[in-house]
Amino acid sequence: MLVYDISNTKVVFKQSSIVIINGDILDLQKLKKCMQDVQDVYHLSGMLGTSELFNDPHRAVDINIHGALNVLEAAIQMGVEKLFYPTKPNEWKNLYSATVQTVEHCCLAFQQAYGLDVRILKLWNVYGPHQKLYPVRKAVPMFIFQALHGLPLEVYGDGSQMVELLYVEEAGRVIIDYVHLPRVFNEPLEVGFGTKMTVNELAKAIIQLCDSSSRIVHVPMRRGEAFIQKFTYLDNITRYLDHFIPTPLHEGLKRTIKYYREISLDEVVQTKRFYYGNR
């Protein structure tokens, strides 16, 4: 397996056969070189953020859209058989939603025009160990960090927004199994296992599992965040993977909490400085 990543962060993989190449998806020639003799491509790179991308919209468009077009073009030119792309089911009025929806349409256009076997999954809220605490703020790791360190759990809005959580390991299994299904899909599928809950319920569960005395506080909604979360499922991947058993939510949260309990003191200090330094 080959991992192509711009980050210099050391990633821990269990398999010793994984090769990591430092590279940028804006570098078309290097992408093409790396795709020589490659059968499947999983395009997982991009700029994330709900409100964060408003700070650098041109770079967000450049990386998320132009970078994805480079991946598509390289895949076509190098004879890649299948390309996977993850997108999101909830369409918010922010740059991340706009860019991933654009790429979703581009993927389907390339499939129709060139015959590239494209597999698109609309993933809900993926969580688990190794999810970064900053600069993009995600509910599960931030709530755990706040609960473990006795800080208030900051919930955007009134907390009645719905989330559907998907543990990272089962997300990986679903993606790989989906890519290897022996048929062609002409439309995206959604991943849903019925693990819906409100943000308030999630925060309370994390406080309990962390055995924390932290309290919940409500703060204003972020730019680009929708108050109402709509669950309007398309064709669900679970009907094609009927053998799949999802990780129970409390088990996934316990594993995730264990990881954040063991992060280094430097990471704790950096996180507090990033979010609370100017307060």
Image (cartoon, rainbow, N blue to C red):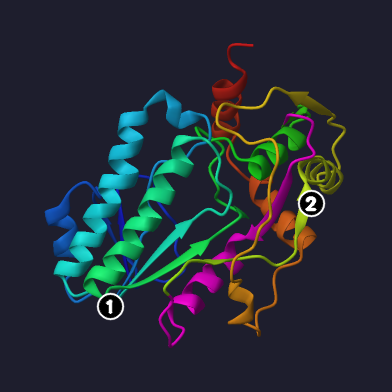
153 to the left or right of 67: right
7 to the left or right of 268: left
Q: Nearer the viewer, residue 157 or 245?
A: 157
239 in magenta = no
**x%, y% of residue 81?**
28, 78
Q: Can residue 127 be seen from the camera position used here?
A: no
Q: Which residues are magenta?
A: 156-185
Disc marking residue 241: none
* Residue drawn where x is 25% and y is 53% of the image: 69
**What SS does tag 2 mark?**
strand
Q: To which residue does mark 1 refer?
A: 81
* Residue drawn where x is 28% and y is 39% of the image: 62
Neighbourhood count class around disc 1 (C-alpha, 10 Å): few under 14, some 14–19, many 20 upward: some
**x%, y% of residue 20?**
30, 59
- For residue 66, above or below residue 122: above
237 to the left or right of 212: left
**What SS does tag 1 mark?**
loop
Question: Who comes first in sequence, dot 1 or dot 2?
Answer: 1
**x%, y% of residue 121?**
50, 64
- For residue 250, above or below residue 141: below
**Amino acid at circle 1:** Glu
**Amino acid at circle 2:** Met
* Residue drawn where x is 64% and y is 51% of the image: 259
Disc marking residue 197: 2
